[in-house]
Image (spheres, rainbow, N blue to C red):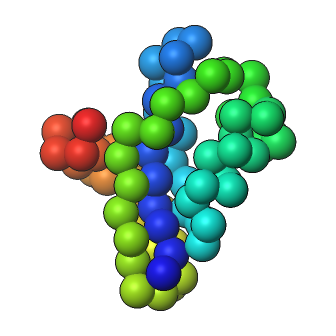
Amino acid sequence: MHYVYILKSEKDNSLYFGSTENIKNRIKEHDRGESKYSKTKLPYKLIWFCAFPNKTKALVFEKYLKHGSGHAFAKKHLI
């Protein structure tokens, strides 16, 4: 399984969209500041995730969420 997730910064309420094979480990990496983009906005709260049967489908959905209509979709339906 591959996961797409949304984190919300408790510092400035910004959203971070990501994907991973190991969601528990990836969230721990974010919490430790090991992600270049997200480390300046710690701490984060996991607010949504979804499992996909393969990496390709997860990456396509993650890319969609990170752009225009996908970002609006996430705000309206997922968070």
Image position of 20 with respect to 71: above or below: below
Image position of 78 with respect to 9: above or below: below
Residue 68 seen in this snapshot = no
Q: Nearer the viewer, residue 73 or 4?
A: 4
Residue 58: where, in percent of width, then height?
A: 45, 74
For image coordinates 39% across by 55% down, the residue present is: 49
Indicate the quadrant where residue 38 lies. Answer: top right
Q: Residue furthest top?
A: 11
For image coordinates 53% across by 24% down, the residue present is: 9
- Count of numbered labels shown in the rendering: 0
Q: Nearer the viewer, residue 45 or 69?
A: 45
Q: Residue furthest left?
A: 77
Indicate the quadrant where residue 39 lies. Answer: top right
For image coordinates 26% across by 37% down, the residue present is: 79
Residue 44: where, in percent of width, then height?
A: 57, 28
Tell me: 58 left or right of 69. Answer: right
For image coordinates 62% across by 46% down, the residue present is: 27
Residue 37: where, in percent of width, then height?
A: 73, 38
Indicate the quadrant where residue 25 lies. Answer: bottom right
Residue 41 seen in this snapshot = yes
Q: Residue furthest front?
A: 24
Tell me: 31 left or right of 61. Answer: right
